[in-house]
Structures are given as structure tokens and as C-alpha cells.
Image: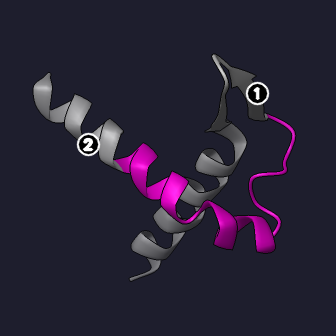
Amino acid sequence: MLRWLIVTFLALLLISWVRPWLEKMGLGKLPGDFHFKLFGREWFIPLTSTLLLSFVISLIARWL
């Protein structure tokens, strides 16, 4: 269980880190990607972008 929490945290950290680059490509602004402010901080939850990127990565992995 702890391993999955660490992987999830690292994935969200990586997505947040590459967010500016992904927004230039149009990802992060799709319907289902949530932006909101809570407690004076901006939060970003990229649900649709994550699904799209994982689909593309799985297609590449199957092709290789």
C-alpha cells in the first residue's frame, strides 16, 4: 500500500513539474482537468490529461 502511495505522489509531482510544458502542447486545458483555488493556493488535478497520456504511453509500449 505504501508503495502505491509513493508512486501516486511521485506521478503527481512529475505532472506538476512538467505542467507548463504540457500546457504549451494543449494538455491541462482539456475538459476534466480541474483548476481551483483553496486555502489561498492554486490546485491542479489533470484527470483527462493523465488518461490521455497513459493511453498514448500504453500504445507506445505495446508497439515496442
Label 2 packing within 10 angstroms: few (<14), some (14-19), many (20+): few
Of tags 2 and 1, which is closer to the observer?
Answer: 1
In primary-sequence order, the first of circles 2 and 1 is: 2
Q: Residue furthest front?
A: 40
User: Quick check: 44 left or right of 15?
Assistant: right
Q: Nearer the viewer, residue 60 or 24?
A: 24
Q: Position of residue 56 (x, y in %)?
A: 59, 65
Q: Label 2 amino acid?
A: Val
User: Quick check: 35 left or right of 38?
Assistant: right
Stretch of the chain drawn in magenta: 11-32
Q: Quadrant of residue 31?
A: top right
- Please tell me whether residue 20 belongs to the stretch shown in magenta: yes
Q: Label 1 amino acid?
A: Phe
User: Quick check: 60 left or right of 38?
Assistant: left
Callouts 2 and 1 close, C-beta under 8 Å: no
Q: For the point 68% across and 50% down, which residue is it?
A: 49
Q: Quadrant of the C terminus?
A: bottom left
Q: Position of residue 8 (x, y in %)?
A: 34, 37
Q: Position of residue 37 (x, y in %)?
A: 73, 25
| Cα gap from disc 2 to disc 1, whole angstroms | 24 Å
Q: For the point 55% across and 66% down, which residue is it?
A: 18
20 versus 37 height, above or below = below
Q: For the point 13% across and 34% down, which residue is it?
A: 3
Residue at which label 1 appears = 36
Q: Quadrant of the N terminus?
A: top left
- Please tell me whether residue 7 belongs to the stretch shown in magenta: no
The numbered mark at residue 13 is none
**Circle 2 sits in a helix, a strand or a loop, which is it?**
helix
Q: For the point 76% across and 27% down, which residue is it?
A: 36
Residue at which label 2 appears = 7
